[in-house]
Image (spheres, helix red, strand yellow):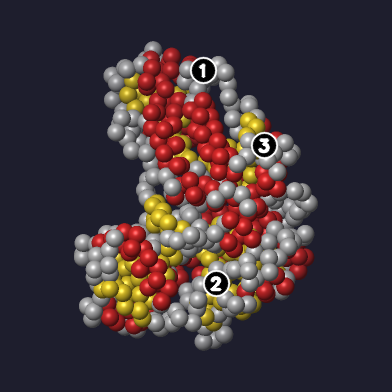
Amino acid sequence: MLRRSLLCLSLGFSVGLACFQTACSQTPQGSLTPTVVPTRSVTSMPVAHGNPDETPIPSPVTTSALGDIRQRGELRVGVLYNYRPFGFLTDNGQVQGYEVDLMRNIAEKWEVDVTFVQVTRQTRLPILYSGNIDVLAAAMPHRRDMEQFVEFSDTTFHSGYVVLVSADGGIDTIAGLGSGAVAAIGSEAQDLLAQYATQVGITPTIRVLSTVEDAVSVFKNAEVGAITGRREDVMLAASSLSNVKILDEFALSEPYAFAVRRGDTPLRDMLNLTLLEITREGKTGEIFSSNFYGYAADLFPVYPGDPAYTFQTFPTDLPDVESIVDRIKRGEPLRVAGLALDANPGRFDCQPIVDGYNRAIINEIARRWHVPVSELPQTVGQPGLDLLKGGQADLVVGIQPNLSLVGQVAFSPPYYQRGLRLIHMQSVTIGGIADLEAKESVAAEPVALSESLIKDNNDIPRVKQITSNEEAFQLLTAGSVYAVVGDEFGMMLMLQTDDRLAVIERRYRLTNYAIALPFYDTELQALMAFTLQDMKRDGTLDRLREQYFVPYMPDDDPLEPLEFEIWPGDGSYLGVGG
């Protein structure tokens, strides 16, 4: 399992810093050194963040552009014509680039034509609002303050400001730069590195250069020992250098995403659904590597299941209902589903563990929102989703994102993970799941996932059917089966009950869980994302995970780092929380 740590620091009032590991931590193996680096000036391309005081906030749309795209048989996409490798015009007049290729694949999936319309950083939002384009694929930074202007798709590229160093120089973090000389590609890179340096207590000498080519030149001449700039620029620089690496940390994380008109959740969700599908097919990785100098692709989410809708059947209705955020502002209770709250759970029932964690999470969210909570018991899974869809619940905790739910509900960022574990009697020698070949075993809850794990790793699986975790425990301790595979918390409860049992320390099929929200309520979706990001940034989320989950892990087994994307910017426009 690839582990990626995330650390978030504060950088001023409205800028959140995040650092996380990326797939580009080293130069692509076997890459050649080009003799010429394409020149890119960054001083003429400021990042447009959006300003509520200067840009009129548009009203949410009342009809989705998805219906218009179907009727026209054409998807109109706004792209930059001068920003390699995202979008650019070739010498023969063709539009090419990473975002262009993604949109071509999406249009192909939808079986419609695609037309690319040139936009600039200054004109892209007005052109989108005018209806002359349906989607912006123009290196749009996903910032909190931009949520009031557009709807963002899932992240398509983890942009932000990073640092390149020599691979064998012994520098593994930005703090390792010390007082060394650094080439900054553009003044914004200089400012951000200087602020970050203050946070980590270093004093690098920063030299501002206007192009990637200039930064590469001074690095080659050993005038500087590092280069900082936007990730796409630093990746370009790395493609022409040998024996270099890009540090895992981001001085500022600012992911890019596609954007549609405010309130157009059907088009946003259809874009996300299609991105998920082409990612599962492996196409996004191919597109990424072919545009980003051979680098391995960023990790994109992959959901299980099958879509409930196609492009032609995806619902386009936009309910004219009040946002739950407005109810929160009036002090009405937050109606929470997804809890069992069973007064007499079985001794190997893992739901009380998850209930405890979810209640702690919701109570912390409610504290930050200054709102009371109304818990809806016996609403785990589908019953909770039914209440959400019927408007009788505001959110459902503990939902595994699934393709079949896209278009019916929205998902928060994943806020915890659960996996499967294998337990056995200490008297039986088992090294892992593949050692169950032709041996009697039990697939405990979640039965389908546990059974598929056993069958996928053994040519002759012998899986015994059971009715409960209690029965699985009795079979195992009686010596009737070699092992039990099931939810990690249920297995650990068995292990803690009988000291004759042993556990394989590996967690299998690690699964993300999110909070399900109404698909149309973009304000609640934004507020929930901001709050969970803040809880990750200030350590609350990890503290609660440790409090509720670590007691049910093997001794000395570290808690798996929770991958978390944190959007910079100010989200106070919602008027709730921090």
State the SS at label 1: loop
Residue at screen point 39% across, 45% down: 561
Q: Quadrant of residue 473?
A: top left
Q: Amino acid at mark 3?
A: Pro
Q: Amino acid at mark 2?
A: Ala
Q: Residues within 10 Å of mark 3 (few under 14, many from 20)?
A: some
Residue 448 position within the rendered picture, expressed as x and y whole percent measured from the top left:
53, 32
State the residue position of label 1: 346
Along the viewing direction, whichever of 499 and 208 lies nearer the viewer:
208
The relative height of residue 41 versus residue 479 in the rendered view (above or below) is below
Of circles 1 and 3, the one toward us is 3
The one of 227 and 323 positioned closer to us in this rendering: 323
- The quadrant of the image that shows the N terminus is top left
Task: Tell me the amino acid under the disc marked 1.
Answer: Gly
Q: Gap between marks 1 and 2, in whole Å?
A: 55 Å
Q: Which residue is mark 2?
A: 48
Give SS at disc 2: loop
Residue 423 is left or right of residue 285, and the answer is left
